Amino acid sequence: MRQHLRTCTLCEAMCGLVITTEGDRVTEIRGDADDPLSKGHICPKAVALQDIHTDPDRIRHPMKRVGDRWERIGWKEAIDLAVEGIQRVQRAHGNDAIAAYVGNPTVHSLGAMLFVGDFLRALRTKNRFSATSVDQLPAHVAAMFMFGHALLIPIPDIDRTDHLLILGANPAVSNGSLMTAPGAAERIKAIRARGGRVVVVDPRRTETAALADAHHAIRPGSDALLLLALLQVIFAESLARPGRLTAFTDGLDTLRELALRFPPERVAAATGLSADAMRSMARDFAAAPRAAAYGRVGVSMQEFGGLATWLISALNLVCGRVDAEGGVMFPTPAVDIRRADQKRDGRPRFARWTSRVRGLPEFAGELPVAALSEEIESPGPGQVRGFVTHGGNPVLSTPDGGRLDRALAGLEFYVAIDFYLNETTRHAHLILPPSSPLEREHYDLIFHGLAVRDTAKYSPPVFDKADDARHEWEIMNAITTRLSTGWRARLRGALRDLGGPSWMLDYALRRGPYGAGLRPRGPGLSLRALKEAPHGVDLGALKPSFPAALRTKDRRIHAAPAIFVADIARLEATWLGAAAPASDALLLIGRRTLRSSNSWMHNVERLVRGKDRCTLLMHPHDATARGLHDGAAVRVTGGVGTITVPLELSSDMMPGVVSLPHGWGHGRPGTALRVAAAHRGVSINDVTDARRVDALTGNAAFSGEPVRVTAIGAR
């Protein structure tokens, strides 16, 4: 038997694992008590690593579509077909006729993260999409405009705070998201145990809210109004204390003038919160010795996600909680991707171009994925006719998935780098399957930069990959090299193929803030040093880093960027001047469960067995008003379609709000996921409308979708 120390790659938490193997078989997976970040914490998903590795449905060889069947082919033929298909579409219709989608699994793979940039650039298309614009795009845009870089996202110093205000997040289930915090539930309990306070704002009494001192149910999509009211109280009652931040912050006066227009009484009806509750919330936050405000997908995935995300940072800023112990801080990771952008001119990479049909703004070279279906369907120059995907399942994870499902069926060419035949890749003409997660070396390039403590950890492969298997980076590099023009680009590809991710990681570690330099055995971090510390290296608690860490052109915090200030008028017109919704309309929100990670964990039997989790949660009062009962099958009708789902009554729901989990809707013809097909559920994105976006950032607005819920047979 052998023991392997590794970081789990199935979510953002970076839990340390001890994996025991016997030959080519995993016999045990448990938490690593000596991991400096997770300290032994483990969630039910970790054991799924062995199930993915041995999954009989996992594709292990390149496959090409021949009529209605799939045929196994060799790697040389597969790469040839991929390159020829991409070039054929681009020769006939132009470079932008190829679209690319990068899914969530990309960020959990060292090789993919290091090679995907060159891969996408080699496609030479402006039609690039990713899971970012259905998830955290507002956080990146706010960070870019306020602090100068999309990855300067404020992280709650959860282990030292005295007051944690959580909006639209459920870290007890997610273990943090854009806040890597394994064992988040225990960390939240520890705040209260040391005399602190935890307050949750969410339309549902979530698992996190059950651990908190207070829960405030808010009407979905109205978070920006609440945050403006909190700021109004703080400014009106002279509670603002930006402290040392004042010396390098611009726009505080503008922020004050703006906030004073939104007293709690003005927004109470729209938010569903009383004016007294909002005043108490603001005063408690301002008075706490150390406090942090944190928001996640419930804030991002709405029509005012950009405003709400900015205002969370603004609240932290005016109370002096930014870059302060116990407030929100900025990790100093061993591999700091932000440092690579030091020589840029500081101008935001945002809205440099827009999507062809609807004019949605670009961010960091990507367009909002809510525009993808229309870009495929709408004729004219630049129409998408070919597709390239890495990981992900946009048919289930992007709005109006049914429309995208139909659009993908008409593509001239589609190549997928994926090892599952899922609801999206079933439309591919060619599938290039990568190795399994246990066959790859790993280092978290992104999540160390979002963690609540600075650590570094390298994970060697648990198993050797098969001789005829390929890592993601090998697949990407092979296509990139073939698509590239000029001898320099081809030479670069050849050198990368020889070195792989290891030499790139070693170089980045040596040149990083804790690095050993370029000496073979210099003091400090290197790949060799991490290999000699298999549990990981503890680099300490988060440290103040401003103003040096700022990446704005003038190295100052911008408290009131013009694009956010201008969007306030849209907020007022929508929420404070609009007519009330139809009396039978309910507002739909999503939810996440501990055993699920988007759509890609549903082919693991141990994670889906038991009670059906794909149910519609509804408050009993709403059910009574509609003549519905617990366990009944009901129809949910949104802006683009209707689904049928079991009803589950729950007093945890805010009246007028219903909830469906994300990532279900399996078992469609042409897929090959036997376990998932036996636990199909329904896709929330068969009713969400791709036209509902945050107009400021382009992020999909899932939260607050108006729906009707009726009994089967009712009209």
Image: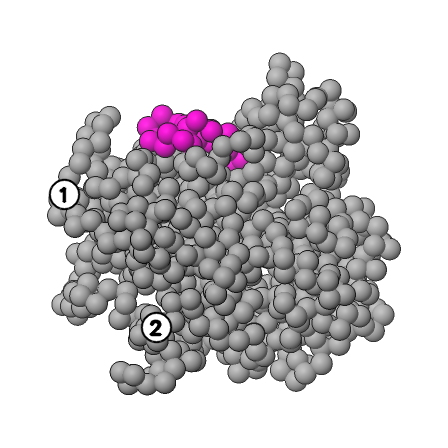
**Percent position of residue 358, x then y:** 48, 46
Left or right side of 710 for 274: right
Residue 137 visible here: no
Which residue bears the numbered disc 1? 74
Q: Give neighbour class at mark 1: few <14, some 14-19, many 20+ (Cα, 10 Å).
A: few
Q: CA distance from mark 1 to mark 2?
A: 38 Å
Tag 1's secondary structure?
loop
Q: Is residue 308 magenta?
A: no
Magenta stretch, main secondary structure class: loop
**Residue corresponding to mark 2:** 532
Instruction: Inspect the image, locate mark 1, and give the three-letter code of the amino acid beneath it.
Output: Gly
76 or 234, nearer to the observer: 76
Question: In what quadrant of the picture does the C terminus appear?
Answer: top right
- Percent across and percent down for residue 222 are 70, 49
Q: Is residue 203 left or right of residue 401?
A: right
Horizontal and vertical percent position of residue 543: 57, 78
Task: Give how far across and how far down residue 493 sits, in percent.
Answer: 19, 64
Which residue is painted at 58% across and 79% down in the image? 544
* SS class, disc 2: loop
Closest to the camera, between mark 1 and mark 2, is 2
Residue count near mark 2 (Cα–Cα under 10 Å), binned few <14, some 14–19, many ≥20: few
Identified by mark 2, the residue type is Glu
The residue stretch that appears in magenta: 665-692
